[in-house]
Amino acid sequence: MLCPSCGQPIRLGSRLCTSCGTWLLEDDARASEQSRATPPPPRQAPPASSLWAPPRAADRVDEPPPAGMGGFGAGGFSAPIVNDIDEHTTLSARRSKPTYWTLSMPNGAVELVTDRAIVVGREPQFMPALPQARLIPVPDPTRSVSKNHACFSLYGATLVVEDLGSTNGVIVTRPNGREDDIGVGGRTELEAGSRVELGDTVINIGRA
């Protein structure tokens, strides 16, 4: 047993602490003997949690959570993860290449309409209002085409022709045969298959 004053061990049956000289009362000696005779109660394990917790990263294994637990992987199902890329996939016909508006000129040349406007005329000149425009001359043996006759440009995906103050104007024949005279300074949207007349010169509109 231990001395209640200094805490040093006391020989069993003795009532005097030889370390500090304290005399033990009968109750103190009896309580100390009982504490030595009675072993401490065993430690109980904490109750198991009803929730499944993932293992630590160091202990983790590639196993699904216990049966009965919800979430992905329950019921023995797991989706495979594919990291490789199929490099042999081909583009569909609709996405294989972009489409452009085309101008088929009287001399057989085909001009693609891009983000830059196209000024067509007998001898097209630089225009401050269209500084980035491409200048494309057309054959004009009858001199019916003005120097800067018409401008073809894109508005989004729509092709538009605009008269630039020409003498003979611009006439558009639609695929259904209808003719539109847009007049001096006018503009109109075009369709694939349309014919644009600049004086006696004809330009065919298409897609490529």
Image: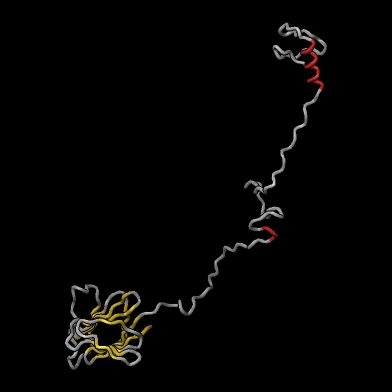
111 in relation to 45, above or below: below
Q: Which quarter shows the C terminus?
A: bottom left
Q: Which quarter shows the N terminus?
A: top right
Residue positioned 80% across, 17% down in the render: 33
The residue lying toward the viewer, choosing from 70 and 205, is 70
Quarter of the view holding residue 97:
bottom left
Q: Residue 74 appears at what percent x and percent y?
A: 67, 58
197 in relation to 129, above or below: below
Q: Residue 110 appears at what percent x and percent y?
A: 32, 85
Q: Residue 96 appears at what percent x and percent y?
A: 45, 77
126 in relation to 80, above or below: below
* Residue 108 visible, this angle: no
Quarter of the view holding residue 139:
bottom left
View extreme (front): residue: 27
Residue positioned 83% across, 11% down in the render: 13
Q: Residue 182 appears at what percent x and percent y?
A: 24, 85
182 in relation to 29, above or below: below
Residue positioned 49% across, 75% down in the render: 91
- Is residue 177 found left or right of 45 in the rendered image? left
**Colour mode of the rendering:** secondary structure
Total marks drawn?
0
Residue positioned 48% across, 80% down in the render: 93
* Residue 33 visible, this angle: yes
